[in-house]
């Protein structure tokens, strides 16, 4: 007997969308006291499904066919006042971005208390007591202070706990979680997942959990539904879908999840092409009259070396200093102390004009495919810009660009299109071509695949591996994702709070992490116990 | 051109464009339709509109043709609007770009100066400039431009600040591009659209400022400005109120047209916002 | 109180701006052809050079520019705004006589424009892109495009001349000797048209800002959360959207304070009100540069104080400001 039954749901998009239907003939079942994970990439319609259940579809988007049966009633047929009575009380919802999902001008306590004010007749004192009890239940440190605090005063993980407390305030029978851990650090994500699992077991709530991460699915799902382009392609118990996927798309998705074991060690040169010694960067925010100055040690005394032709992975969570380090390497930021040498040449000692002239030695690939290309320039020009700035005649530079496009797997005919005509994965390839146009000795890749869908991620990682072989690239690869690091990196340095806590050969660190933090990082990777049944990269969509 | 198509989708924007073209048409044709000097005596004073076939809109208290003044006034208003806006935006973009790109003390100093201009009521500053430098039309136009630059500077600065830290700009720096090239060829084309849209606001303000000055008899009396006519009509407001009413309607329609066009441009450039 | 110290810091930061304004203007005025003495001479119908020399040294106008500037700044610090040759009184007393009228006019107009603009903006945003929104937005645009002096004059024509409901100008009926409540009522009666005129333009601006701000906030994530909690549309508006949407409007008050003061010059001229704006106009015409400088000083002070109050209010409403240091 299912609690929530979505039957043949079709949701139409307004005219001009990239497809006529956001959801087509979607059928899902969720029983009481179980967790159903809806898995899919961007554009699969998984968030739209959640919106349709709650009756919170965006402007212009409407359900045109099907039913959503909840506790025996069709939610699509209910009036708005009736739906409002259900929202919060019988169905709770947790959103992805806790910073923006909470009103920045009101305290946490007042926002959670609002649940009680809207749906019950409790007095103010009773509401406050319940809020404290809820915050305690979600294991927020110092519930009383948290209740008085504003959203910006809490950390990301604490905000999400508050959101979960808010969603569970009235003991709903159904909890919808729309990518609740995607915006969190890996260690925080592990904690929140565990919290959701525990709460679910204790209260017997049914959970509809939306995610794009198969590792998360492996960790918490009882049942799984896979969505693609608005349709459900496969559905069933977790053990079955995860270990014996039937549909080719599911198999391709599973094949795209990078395994957590590093590939075989490659022979590496003994010579270091890039060496970092005692690098430090501190941010000082001036206080009033010299008091209350805030000092942040973004990078503390970091020393690393990159063997020629090898890949050094820098792994860390947000705030670890890895991005700052990357920017110091290319001198987008000037460090306060230390030495960065490429082929023996001290980069930090170069004057600004000399640095500009010698820019080709080290180049960078950026994280955000949408912000890293100038929207007003054609992509061929973007790739040819670098050499042209340094004196290469235009015709030659464009010819090189054409070659590079072929190298990164893009059609040479698309040289005079604009960035917005390409997908995220294609844009990252263009960014890569731009960096390679300068024929750098060292390539710094700052989270180059973090913003991409998992299937596209696999393609770009494969491209990087190929290029590394072909061009003999030496790479510094920044990431927060251990699975991604395992694919490419020969050596790994783990960063935390600005310092390197552990460094060594990838195989060693994966097999035997020594530092506590490294071990915690590994323990927090979702789905680490699950072995994908389809070998990595063998099947594509 | 998809921009044109997006623009034409909004009826208000189309209406504004039509109105603006009418005003421009008036300005262009003023020399043919009313070849005589509009400020010369043309007939009996204070005739009502439609009372005489020669004077469609009547005559003012000194016997000048109101219709002629309206047509020639269109020239004046549009010219002042365009030139003052160009000056204001020119100064604003340079100041804003430098402040936004370099930051640090350059930013502090430039923004202090902008703040100084903005703390002073701009009409009062205009009065001071006119008191010091005189009332001829060139001075008035330049003065209006000088008084209006801070908002466009702040807008440009805000755009530069946000674009400066955008990854494609960082990529240019890593490639080894010079600062000047980055400012003018990479950032500026992306920063300009909101400033261009704001130009319509500045133009509207410029026209209103000049007419206010003219009304107070502080603008150029030898120019057939609409504001001058309204000011002249103040003395005969009791009975011949049309002398002031007509040019006021002209100002209203022109400023309305400019604002609608600006809004239409804004909506066309930001299609995401239109659907709300 | 952290809010107070934050606002005081901003106040201290505006002192250099004030200095910049005053020095800039003083030097600017040195470029003016003719000075107070020339104007006086013109009023008195001419005089011989010896007399002019005497007067110049009396007013201290023969000293080098930098010395005059230093003296001027020193006098300002002691709030001595100099002497008005035209009115024959210290500038500060001339200004103080006229200040209350302008403050009253501006204060009431501001409150009215803000309140009405906000309310209409909320209404327009609630029914965005439907006919109430189109109507309100169009009216707003028309108000914005209307020259204030013209609107005032048309108001006089309709309400004072044709309908005789309201007086055509002036601050109060002179000579009736009314006091207390009767006087207040009389002044209020006289201020109806001027306030409507001055408030009109700013109402249009607040309306547009409020509407845009409401639409912006309505698209933010936490509004979706509020709806997911089961709040009705009204509840969402009142408890979540309004306060957040109010913030840009508040900032706008600070930015518009100067513009409103400038607008009062025109409105006071149309309606013959004995205020600061009118005084500014008169001192330009009569070339009383001392008074003009004094008015500029007072205007700058006024704008800075309004911004100070706005900063306090903003910090009170938005907890992120105080924390972000």
Image: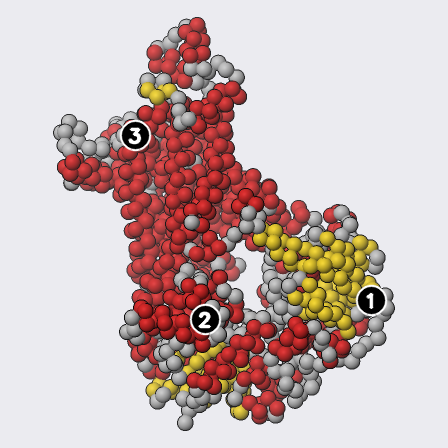
Q: Residue at x 43, y 87 (%)?
A: A204
- Any mark on residue A308, and which? 1
C125 or B266, nearer to the observer: C125
Q: Chain of mark 3?
A: C
Labels 1 and 2: the sequence-earlier one: 2
Q: Residue at x 30, y 41 (%)?
A: C107
Q: Examine the rendered structure and indicate whether residue B233 appears above or below residue B157.
A: above
Looking at the rendered structure, whether the residues under marks 1 and 2 are on a common chain is answered as: yes
Q: Secondary structure at mark 3?
A: helix
Residue at far right of view: A270
Q: Secondary structure at mark 2?
A: helix
Residue at mark 1 to residue at mark 2: CA–CA distance: 48 Å
Q: Which quadrant is home to the C terminus of chain B?
A: bottom left
Residue B15 image position (x, y, % from top left): 38, 53
Tell me: B107 left or right of B28: right
Q: Nearer the viewer, mark 3 or mark 2?
A: 2
Mark 1 residue crowding within 10 angstroms, few (<14) / some (14–19) / many (20+): many
Mark 3 residue crowding within 10 angstroms, few (<14) / some (14–19) / many (20+): some
Q: Residue at x 69, y 86 (%)?
A: A535
- Any mark on residue A54, and which? none
Q: Residue at x 44, y 69 (%)?
A: A143
Tell me: A56 left or right of B179: left
Residue A510 image position (x, y, % from top left): 72, 78
- Residue beneath disc 3: C98
Q: Name the image colouring.
A: secondary structure
Count of marks placed on residues: 3
Residue B122 image position (x, y, % from top left): 42, 36
Q: Chain of mark 1?
A: A
Tell me: C155 left or right of B266: left
- Residue beneath disc 2: A162
Residue at far bottom of view: A1
Residue at mark 3 to residue at mark 1: CA–CA distance: 80 Å
């Amino acid at each position: 007997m299912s609690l929530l039954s979505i039957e043949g749901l079709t949701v139409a998009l307004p005219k001009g969308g990239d497809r006529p239907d956001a959801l087509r003939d979607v059928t899902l079942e969720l029983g009481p006291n179980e967790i159903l994970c809806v898995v899919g990439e961007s554009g699969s319609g998984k968030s739209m499904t959640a919106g349709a259940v709650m009756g919170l579809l965006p402007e212009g988007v409407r359900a045109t066919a099907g039913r959503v049966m909840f506790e025996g009633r069709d939610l699509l047929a209910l009036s708005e006042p009736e739906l409002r009575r259900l929202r919060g009380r019988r169905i709770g919802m947790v959103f992805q971005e806790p910073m923006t999902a909470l009103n920045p001008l009101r305290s946490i306590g007042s926002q959670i208390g609002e649940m009680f004010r809207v749906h019950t007749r409790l007095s103010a004192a009773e509401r406050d007591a319940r809020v404290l009890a809820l915050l305690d239940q979600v294991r927020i440190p110092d519930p009383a202070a948290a209740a008085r605090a504003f959203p910006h005063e809490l950390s990301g993980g604490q905000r999400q706990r508050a959101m979960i407390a808010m969603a569970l305030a009235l003991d709903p029978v159904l909890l919808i979680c729309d990518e609740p851990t995607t915006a969190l650090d890996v260690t925080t994500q592990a904690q929140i997942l565990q919290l959701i699992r525990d709460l679910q077991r204790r209260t017997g709530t049914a959970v509809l959990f939306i995610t794009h991460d198969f590792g998360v699915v492996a960790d918490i799902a009882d049942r799984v539904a896979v969505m693609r382009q608005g349709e459900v392609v496969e559905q069933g118990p977790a053990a079955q879908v995860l270990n014996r996927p039937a549909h080719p798309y599911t198999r391709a998705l599973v094949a795209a999840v990078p395994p957590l074991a590093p590939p075989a060690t490659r022979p590496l040169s003994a010579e270091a092409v890039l060496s970092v010694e005692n690098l430090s960067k501190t941010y000082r925010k001036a206080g009033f009259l010299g008091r209350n100055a805030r000092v942040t040690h973004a990078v503390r005394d970091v020393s690393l070396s990159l063997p020629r032709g090898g890949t050094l992975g820098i792994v860390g969570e947000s705030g670890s200093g890895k991005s700052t380090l990357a920017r110091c390497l290319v001198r987008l930021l000037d460090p306060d102390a230390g030495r960065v040498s490429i082929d023996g040449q001290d980069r930090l000692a170069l004057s600004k004009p000399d640095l500009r002239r010698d820019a080709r030695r080290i180049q960078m690939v950026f994280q955000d495919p949408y912000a890293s290309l100038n929207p007003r320039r054609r992509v061929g020009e973007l790739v040819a810009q670098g050499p042209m700035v340094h004196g290469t005649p235009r015709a030659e530079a464009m010819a090189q660009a054409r070659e590079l496009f072929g190298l990164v797997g893009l059609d040479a005919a698309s040289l005079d299109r604009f960035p917005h005509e390409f997908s995220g994965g294609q844009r990252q390839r263009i960014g890569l071509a731009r960096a390679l146009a300068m024929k750098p000795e060292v390539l710094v890749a700052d989270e180059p695949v973090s913003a991409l869908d998992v299937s596209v991620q696999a393609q770009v990682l494969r491209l990087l591996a190929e290029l590394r072989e072909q061009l003999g690239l030496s790479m510094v690869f920044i990431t927060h994702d251990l699975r991604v690091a395992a694919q490419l990196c020969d050596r790994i340095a783990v960063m935390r709070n600005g310092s390197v806590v552990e460094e060594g050969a990838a195989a060693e660190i994966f097999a035997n992490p020594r530092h506590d933090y490294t071990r915690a990082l590994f323990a927090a990777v979702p789905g680490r116990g699950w072995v994908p049944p389809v070998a990595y990269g063998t099947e594509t969509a | 051109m998809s921009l044109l198509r997006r623009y034409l989708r909004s009826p208000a924007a189309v209406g504004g464009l039509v109105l603006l073209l009418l005003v421009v048409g008036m300005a262009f044709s003023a020399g043919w339709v009313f070849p005589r000097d509009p400020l010369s005596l043309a007939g009996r004073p204070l005739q009502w509109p439609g009372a005489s076939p020669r004077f469609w809109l009547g005559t003012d208290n000194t016997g000048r043709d109101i219709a002629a003044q309206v047509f020639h006034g269109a020239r004046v208003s549009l010219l002042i609007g365009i030139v003052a806006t160009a000056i204001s935006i020119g100064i604003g973009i340079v100041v804003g770009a430098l402040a936004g790109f370099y930051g640090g003390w350059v930013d502090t100093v430039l923004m202090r100066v902008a703040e100084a201009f903005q703390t002073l009521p701009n009409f009062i500053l205009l009065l001071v400039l006119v008191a010091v430098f005189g009332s001829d039309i060139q001075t008035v136009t330049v003065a209006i431009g000088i008084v209006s630059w801070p908002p466009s500077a702040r807008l440009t600065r805000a755009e530069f600040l946000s674009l400066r830290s955008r990854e494609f700009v960082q990529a240019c720096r890593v490639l080894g591009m010079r600062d000047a090239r980055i400012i003018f060829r990479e950032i500026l084309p992306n920063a300009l659209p909101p400033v261009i849209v704001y130009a319509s606001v500045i133009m509207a303000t410029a026209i209103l400022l000049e007419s206010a000055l003219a009304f107070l008899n502080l603008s150029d009396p030898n120019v057939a400005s609409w504001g001058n006519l309204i000011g002249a009509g103040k003395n005969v407001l009791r009975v011949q109120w049309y002398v002031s009413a007509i040019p006021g309607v002209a100002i209203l329609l022109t400023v309305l047209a400019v604002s609608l066009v600006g809004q239409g441009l804004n909506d066309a450039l930001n299609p995401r916002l239109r659907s709300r | 109180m952290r809010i107070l110290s934050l606002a005081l810091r901003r106040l201290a930061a505006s002192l250099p701006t004030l200095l910049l304004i005053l020095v800039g203007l003083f030097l600017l005025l040195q470029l003016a052809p003719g000075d107070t003495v020339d104007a006086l001479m013109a009023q008195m119908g001419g005089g011989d050079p010896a007399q002019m020399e005497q007067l110049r040294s009396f007013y201290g106008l023969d000293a080098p520019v930098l010395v005059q500037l230093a003296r001027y700044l020193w006098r300002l610090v002691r709030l001595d705004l100099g002497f008005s040759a035209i009115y024959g009184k210290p500038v500060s007393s001339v200004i103080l006589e006229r200040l209350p009228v302008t403050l009253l006019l501006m204060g009431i107009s501001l409150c009215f424009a803000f309140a009405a603009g906000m309310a209409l903006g909320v209404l327009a945003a609630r029914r965005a892109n439907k006919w109430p929104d189109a109507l309100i937005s169009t009216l707003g645009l028309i108000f914005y495009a209307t020259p204030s002096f013209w609107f005032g004059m048309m108001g006089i024509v309709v309400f004072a001349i044709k309908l005789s409901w309201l007086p055509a100008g002036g601050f109060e009926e002179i000579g009736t000797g009314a006091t207390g409540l009767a006087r207040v009522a009389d002044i209020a009666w006289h201020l109806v048209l001027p306030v409507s005129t001055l408030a009109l333009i700013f109402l249009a601006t607040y309306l547009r800002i409020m509407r845009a701000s409401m639409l912006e906030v309505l698209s933010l994530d936490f509004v979706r959360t509020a709806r997911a909690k089961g709040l009705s549309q009204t509840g969402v508006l009142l408890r979540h959207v309004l306060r957040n949407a109010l913030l840009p409007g508040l900032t706008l008050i600070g930015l518009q304070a100067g513009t409103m003061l400038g607008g009062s010059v025109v409105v006071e001229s149309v309606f013959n009100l004995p205020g600061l704006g009118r005084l500014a106009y008169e001192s330009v015409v009569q070339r009383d540069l001392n008074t003009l400088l004094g008015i500029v000083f007072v205007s700058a002070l006024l704008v800075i104080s309004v911004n100070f109050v706005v900063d306090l209010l903003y910090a009170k409403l938005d907890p992120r400001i105080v924390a972000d240091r």
